[in-house]
Amino acid sequence: MKNMLDKISSPIQSDLKEFDKHFINSLNSDVKTINTIVNYIVRKKGKRLRPRLSLLSAKICGDVNIKTHKVASLLEILHVATLIHDDVVDDSELRRGWPSVGKLWKNKLSILVGDYLFSKALTNMAAIESMNSVKILANLASRLSQGEILQIEKAISKNINEETYFKMMSDKTASLFSASCKLGAITATNDDKKITALSNFGELLGQAFQIKDDLFDIVGNIGSTGKPSGYDLKKNMLTLPLIHIFDKMSITDQRFFKIKLKMLLRKNKFKSIKKLIIEEGGIEYAESKLLEVSKSARYELEIFKDCKEKDSLITALEFNLNRLG
């Protein structure tokens, strides 16, 4: 998988090094506790897909510039802030296989550091000096919060159909991918068709990314994903495989299936849960939707001529299809 990430980054290697400088500089604080927690968060870089998408989107449209780096930095800061807040909301003890910020520093500090990161993102936003970019980021902030709240609402009611699922996960996950591509493109071109195509590509890639995570919740493990299998199931978060299963069942059948699922969850019998969901066609359906959404994302790139940057964006889709965590 590292080879695929290297392939994605191939046209922007020097730009990524410059991004790292901007990103770290954007996080500096005069408060020691903030720096300690922030350094802990960023010590394990993760995939850094969103800044890679910003840089590639700028480069496929023109050239990476100082505004591109500011955009890429603020979007990664926003991403990290949402992860911290997500862990508080979900009572997560792990993030990428390591103790979460809340586990080590408790929720009060987690929320405050998340808020600090949001403020640093706003600082970067102001430096871009683009009203269009500000509007995109304001819409992004709204979508992120709405998606998170909708997920909590549906986890409580345990009632969600596929249409609502796509709305929820598009806001919660895909919006950040879309904004990464769109804002990166805006720093390099005024071509509305190219900007829209990249925005759509990011949205669809983000949807595919979430569907893949849904599959990991059933077939993954803590070594590859950083969280245990069945985590979302335990939190009453309905994922695509289960939504599909419930959609084709009668209310009575749903009730019996949920009782069986709860019994297996209580006993931590995740192999049995996986077998049950496979037998009901949940995994197969989610995998087919993953391929369908990925194909739609690939189509959005047809507006661009063949080039290294286009190859890298296509590789990002392949990376998601094949990733193990």
Image (cartoon, helix red, strand yellow):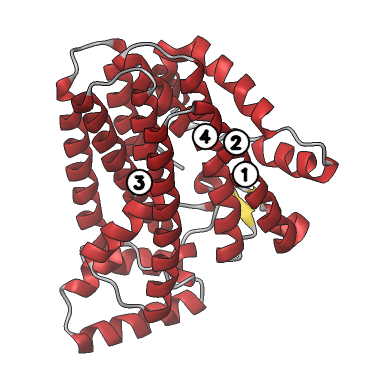
Q: Residues within 10 Å of mark 1 (few under 14, many from 20)?
A: some
Q: Residues within 10 Å of mark 3 (few under 14, many from 20)?
A: many
User: At 58% from the left edge and 56% from the top edge, which residue is drawn?
Assistant: 85
Q: Position of residue 125 (x, y in %)?
A: 52, 34
* Badge 4 amino acid: Met
* Badge 1 amino acid: Ser
* Badge 3 amino acid: Ala
Front position among marks 3 and 4: 4
Mark sitting on residue 125: 4
> Would you name the residue on which mark 3 appears?
174
Q: Nearer the viewer, residue 5 or 132?
A: 132
* Badge 2 amino acid: Thr
Q: How much space separates mark 2 and mark 3, taking CA atoms?
A: 23 Å
User: At 64% from the left edge and 51% from the top edge, which residue is drawn?
Assistant: 115
Q: Earlier in the sequence, mark 4 or mark 1?
A: 1
Camera sees residue 88: yes
Q: Residues within 10 Å of mark 2 (few under 14, many from 20)?
A: some
Front position among marks 3 and 1: 1
| Tags 1 and 2 touching, CB below 8 Å | yes
Q: How much space separates mark 4 and mark 1, taking CA atoms?
A: 10 Å
Mark sitting on residue 123: 2
Q: Position of residue 224 (x, y in %)?
A: 51, 44
Camera sees residue 96: no
> Would you name the residue on which mark 1 appears?
119
